[in-house]
Image (cartoon, rainbow, N blue to C red):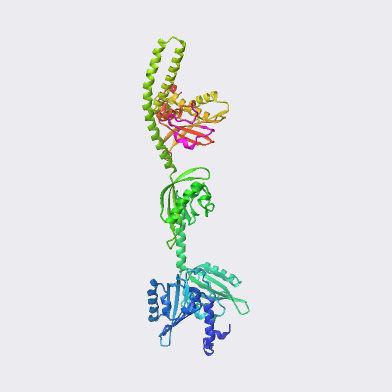
């Protein structure tokens, strides 16, 4: 650049033509995204650059008028504040004015703008003009500061912009620094900045990173909209979004760089705070036991936590995002979920505490108590929904067990009453057969009498079983060694069952004793083994296991008949056809059977249940169709101290 261009006196002696200055100013206005304006304070006439039409959609002639045309388009809620701040800037003698407000575009929508002005005073100090620049801050990320080579062309604009504008030579020394840049460096004048490098203003680690960035730009690699964390000489920390581009001479050779930075400290601090809050919220969501998820307006998943992933049978959130319930669940279940989603999305009304049945991909069934609420954007428009599902599977199971117990109790009372009536009917028949045997002499009559007596005795035996179910079975209690009990039952099943059924045992050598009637306990295990045999007509495997089991508070909370204590656990497992889910809750009811007519009384499992309860225990069952069944009998283990009081001969 010629030396004369640096000499203010030379410029005054050789002023540039007004047309050239005007043309240059128009070029500047055209090259930027900001709207430049020039307001004559005496006539109220306002000139605006072409950017006004591009930014707000108005034809040029519609905006070329006095200041009131512009004021009328400011949002009513902002208008008074803006007018008052402008007047305050003019009357107070200040040079700079700045305001943010909403401006109505041609399409009727409002744009958020940042308006800045400079008050020009005449020789007497009277404000005569106000020039300035307006930025559309609705899209701050889209704004770029375009720097030009000619310093004289940019100087007026540079000195009145609030952004940091600077230039550096090939040695990264400052050759230009505007007022905002001077202030950010902790200086009071540009003279304190020129000729110095970033190492003169910033801590070494920050200056080294800035120097490294500058070298990349000087090699022809511009940095556009890069965030930088800056610490000035006073220790103040601020964030800028910076653009650096190579500065070239007329021949295209790089002779330095030009940089522009905008202070985004408040925005960055808000962003970091928001990020921290999001991370905190994410940590809470991911570690809650409830299933939490979000869906967009098309019912596609946009967020899911670990509990929800578990219900969906997925390992990562990436497997779920963008999918709907129809991609994951059976159609009938997905359709029910979708109907609830649509109700929330269309009406804006939440669905609260809805019980939902979830079938996992592995076939497992879980029950959720779900609440779904609308998800709104900043404008209050529904853009999706948020769902929270609490797993109530254990609660449902407890309710089912409680209802089953109530039903069995009611059936027991009914059966007991019927059994008493039947017993009263059968007793005279048995007495009469005894008396008739003394009077009837012919063989045919005696044969008929024997059939009557056998039928009556069989009916009486059924009545005794029903009475045993209804009021519980009593018997002689003594210590029973589970190892010997399993050994006896295994011997009977091995000798009497089909050879196609393979019997296996697994007995814990340290298993404790139980107090009970050994005959009744034999009956329990044999009943379960016979049912297992009948479930495997083509053969299979029958497994008998016995071990110690300590029921903790959690187990007891899930099994209402259990108490936190030590039990002896007997397990009878088969590989048969399993129990259909629809009848599983009824298998312990008296007279209920899935066997063919004449092949079962339906009293085996009900009697088994009655015996187990009379021994202070309980029974559970697990079964899957075509995979087999497993019955678990829990009997209280005898404390070692009680066992020592009993004579050794009773241990059998």
Q: Residue furthest top?
A: 441
Query: Can residue 80 be seen here?
Result: yes
The front one of 47 and 550 is 47
Q: Position of residue 628 (x, y in %)?
A: 53, 34
User: Which residue is pictured at 37% across the width and 32% down the height?
Assistant: 410
Q: Position of residue 53 (x, y in %)?
A: 49, 76
The front one of 26 and 353 is 353
Q: Position of residue 646 (x, y in %)?
A: 41, 24
Q: Which residues are magenta?
A: 573-597
The front one of 469 and 150 is 469
Q: Position of residue 118 (x, y in %)?
A: 44, 80
Find out whether residue 437 is within the magenta segment: no
Query: Can residue 563 be seen here?
Result: no
Q: Main secondary structure of the magenta part?
A: loop
User: Which residue is pictured at 38% across the width and 81% down the height?
Assistant: 91
Q: How many marks?
A: 0
Q: Is residue 363 left or right of residue 472?
A: right
Q: Residue furthest bottom?
A: 13
Q: Quadrant of the N terminus?
A: bottom right
The front one of 588 and 160 is 588
In the rendered image, the vertical position of residue 555 relative to residue 520, given as above or below: below
Find out whether residue 580 is within the magenta segment: yes
């Amino acid at each position: 650049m010629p030396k004369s261009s640096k000499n203010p006196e030379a410029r005054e002696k050789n002023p540039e033509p007004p047309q050239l200055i005007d043309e240059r100013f128009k070029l500047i206005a055209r090259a930027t995204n900001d709207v430049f304006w020039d307001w004559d304070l005496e006539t109220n006439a306002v000139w605006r650059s072409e950017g006004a039409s591009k930014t707000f959609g108005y034809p040029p002639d519609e905006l070329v008028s006095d200041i009131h045309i512009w004021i009328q388009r400011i949002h009513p809620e902002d208008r008074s504040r803006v007018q008052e701040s402008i007047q305050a800037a003019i009357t107070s003698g200040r040079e700079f004015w700045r305001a943010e407000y909403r401006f109505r575009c041609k399409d009727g929508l409002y744009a958020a703008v940042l308006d800045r002005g400079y008050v020009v005073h005449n020789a007497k100090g009277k404000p005569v003009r106000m020039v300035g620049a307006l930025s559309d801050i609705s899209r701050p990320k889209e704004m770029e500061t375009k720097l030009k080579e000619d310093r004289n062309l940019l100087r007026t604009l540079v000195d009145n912009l609030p952004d940091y504008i600077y230039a550096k030579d090939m040695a990264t020394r400052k050759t230009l620094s505007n007022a905002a840049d001077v202030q950010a460096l902790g200086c009071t004048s540009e003279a304190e900045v020129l000729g110095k490098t970033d190492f003169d203003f910033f801590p070494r680690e920050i200056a080294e990173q800035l120097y490294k960035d500058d070298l990349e730009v000087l090699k022809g690699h511009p940095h556009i909209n890069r965030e930088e964390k800056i610490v000035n000489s006073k220790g103040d920390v601020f964030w800028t979004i910076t653009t650096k581009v190579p500065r070239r001479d007329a021949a295209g050779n790089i002779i330095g760089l030009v940089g522009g930075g905008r202070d985004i400290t408040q925005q960055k601090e808000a962003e970091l705070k928001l990020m921290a809050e999001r991370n905190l919220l994410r940590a809470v969501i991911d570690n809650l036991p409830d299933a939490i998820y979000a869906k967009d307006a098309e019912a596609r998943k946009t967020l899911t936590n670990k509990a929800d992933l578990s219900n969906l049978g997925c390992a990562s959130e990436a497997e779920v995002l963008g999918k709907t319930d129809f991609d994951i669940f059976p159609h009938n279940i997905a359709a029910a979920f979708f109907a609830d989603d649509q109700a929330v999305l269309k009406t804006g009304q939440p669905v609260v505490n809805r019980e939902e049945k979830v079938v996992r991909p592995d076939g497992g069934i879980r029950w959720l108590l779900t609440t779904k609420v609308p998800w709104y954007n900043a404008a209050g428009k529904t853009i999706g929904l948020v769902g929270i599902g609490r797993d109530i599977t254990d609660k449902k199971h407890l309710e089912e067990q409680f209802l089953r117990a109530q039903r069995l109790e009611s059936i027991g009372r009914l059966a007991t009453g019927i059994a008493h009536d039947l017993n009263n009917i059968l007793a005279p028949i048995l007495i009469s057969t005894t008396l008739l045997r003394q009077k009837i002499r012919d063989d045919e009559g005696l044969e008929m009498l024997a059939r009557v007596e056998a039928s009556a005795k069989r009916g009486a035996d059924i009545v005794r079983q029903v009475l045993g179910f209804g009021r519980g079975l009593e018997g002689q209690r003594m210590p029973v060694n589970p190892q010997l009990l399993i050994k006896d039952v295994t011997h009977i099943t091995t000798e009497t069952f089909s050879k196609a059924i393979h019997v296996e045992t697994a007995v814990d050598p340290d298993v404790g004793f139980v107090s009970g009637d050994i005959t009744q306990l034999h009956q329990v295990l044999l009943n379960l083994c016979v049912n297992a045999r009948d479930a495997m007509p083509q053969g299979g495997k029958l497994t008998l296991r016995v071990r110690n089991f300590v029921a903790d508070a959690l187990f007891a909370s899930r099994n209402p008949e259990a108490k936190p204590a030590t039990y002896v656990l007997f397990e009878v497992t088969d590989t048969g056809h399993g129990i259909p889910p629809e009848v599983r809750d009824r298998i312990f009811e008296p007279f209920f059977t899935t066997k063919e007519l004449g092949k079962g009384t339906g009293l085996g499992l009900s009697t088994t249940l009655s015996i187990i309860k009379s021994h202070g225990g309980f029974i559970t069952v697990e079964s899957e169709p075509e995979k087999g069944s497993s019955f678990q009998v829990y009997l209280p283990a005898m404390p070692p101290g009680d066992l020592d009081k009993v004579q050794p001969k009773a241990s059998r």
